[in-house]
């Protein structure tokens, strides 16, 4: 009950700051756009015409491909813009927890520091997860009712996006505990988010290095940091019902997230308040 109370308090704080409402409003707006902007004329189970905002798109697509293309577009939009905005909206939750007066209220209660931090962390993830699943389910239902095609792999893409956000938020939690600054932790997380895809070009980077030891450092960073570009590709493959070429980026990124959250809990327990 104490753990759930901390999660509930995080939700209430998000409501007070209008973060949750803003997320919900944006998700609803996107879904309403699909209701009024997407028009399908179906003949014998095949699309005869497909138009978005009155503009007809390529007729060579069959209906399955149209649905998967639209859902893949939404998934890519959520993976990029959605995660970007989610990190921005939740960047202050951990530093706010550490503010004098706020943290004093928590540690004065019969609740462990691990419960405090993990509860706060879980509350932030739950806020983002609710909005992502809301958008995925709502838009999926709209497309399914309009076309009669139910692509359950679309939901897997949404779950994947939540996992990626959670991994990145463990890093922002760590930076937030160390710096007590929301903007600083956000900038460092964005830096890693945008730097990680560059490590895919390790072969080109090796040619610029003066020592092989720098190459070992680049390899170490690649395998240690979350692999956002590959995780985005896995999300696209899941939505499209394709075979995932490699799960290594996922499990290695999950290990990174577990390590960062565990280390954050350790630092939080050792802090003097």
Image (cartoon, rainbow, N blue to C red):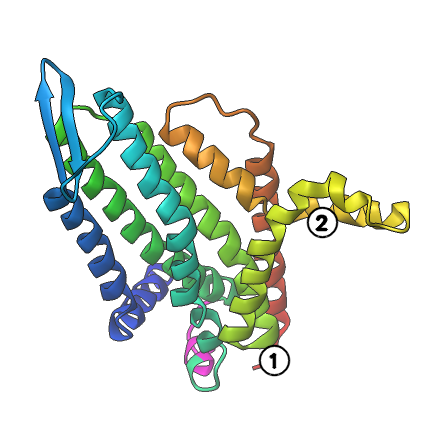
Quadrant that contains the C terminus? bottom right
x and y, in percent, of residue 142 in the image: 15, 37
Q: Quadrant of residue 25?
A: bottom left
Q: Quadrant of residue 158?
A: top left
Residue 252's disc number: none
From what the image shows, is residue 112 above or below residue 61?
below
Identity of the residue drawn at 60% across and 57% down? 192
Proximity of marks 2 and 1: CB atoms separated by less than 8 Å: no
Q: Describe the element under mark 2 as helix, strand or loop.
A: helix
Q: Which residue is mark 1?
A: 272
Determine whether, in the image, residue 198 is placed left or right of residue 89.
Answer: right
Residue 109 in magenta? yes
Identity of the residue drawn at 43% across and 36% down? 235
x and y, in percent, of residue 201 in the image: 68, 42
Determine whether, in the image, residue 144 is placed left or right of residue 212.
Answer: left
x and y, in percent, of residue 238 in the image: 41, 29
Q: Quadrant of residue 270?
A: bottom right
Marked residue nearer the N-terminal end (2 or 1):
2
Identity of the residue drawn at 39% across and 59% down? 86
x and y, in percent, of residue 127 in the image: 32, 58
What range is drawn magenta here?
103-111
Determine whether, in the image, residue 75 is placed left or right of residue 50.
Answer: right
Identity of the residue drawn at 57% across and 55% down? 194
At label 1, counting other C-alpha atoms closer than 10 Å, the crowd grade (few under 14, some 14-19, many 20 or more) is: few
Along the line of sight, which residue is nearer the eye, 33 or 239?
A: 33
User: Can residue 265 be seen at all in this image of the molecule?
Assistant: no
Along the line of sight, which residue is nearer the eye, 253 or 116?
A: 253
From what the image shows, is residue 36 above or below residue 187?
above
Quadrant that contains the N terminus? bottom left
Residue 221's disc number: 2
Q: Give the spatial CA distance, label 2 vs label 1.
A: 31 Å
Residue at far bottom of view: 101
């Amino acid at each position: 009950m104490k753990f759930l109370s901390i999660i509930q308090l995080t939700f209430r704080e998000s409501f007070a700051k209008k973060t949750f409402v803003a997320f919900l409003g944006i998700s609803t707006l996107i879904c309403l756009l699909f209701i009024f902007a997407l028009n399908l004329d179906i003949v014998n189970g095949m699309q005869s015409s497909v138009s978005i905002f009155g503009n007809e798109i390529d007729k060579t697509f069959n209906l399955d491909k149209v649905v998967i293309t639209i859902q893949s577009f939404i998934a890519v939009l959520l993976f990029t813009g959605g995660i970007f905005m989610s990190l921005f909206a939740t960047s202050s939750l951990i530093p706010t927890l550490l503010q004098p007066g706020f943290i004093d209220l928590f540690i004065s209660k019969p609740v462990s520091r691990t419960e405090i931090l993990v509860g706060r962390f879980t509350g932030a993830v739950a806020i983002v997860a609710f909005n992502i699943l809301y958008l995925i389910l709502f838009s999926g239902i709209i497309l399914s009712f309009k076309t009669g095609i139910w692509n359950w792999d679309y939901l897997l893409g949404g779950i994947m996006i939540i996992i990626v956000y959670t991994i990145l938020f463990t890093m922002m939690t760590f930076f937030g505990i160390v710096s007590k600054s929301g903007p600083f932790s956000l900038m460092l997380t964005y830096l890693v988010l945008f730097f990680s895809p560059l490590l895919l070009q390790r072969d080109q980077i090796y040619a610029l290095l003066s020592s092989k030891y720098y190459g070992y450092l680049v390899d170490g960073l690649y395998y240690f940091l979350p692999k956002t570009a590959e995780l985005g590709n896995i999300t696209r493959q899941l939505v499209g019902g394709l075979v995932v070429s490699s799960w290594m980026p996922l499990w290695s990124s999950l290990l990174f997230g577990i390590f960062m959250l565990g280390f954050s809990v350790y630092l939080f327990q050792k802090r003097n308040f």
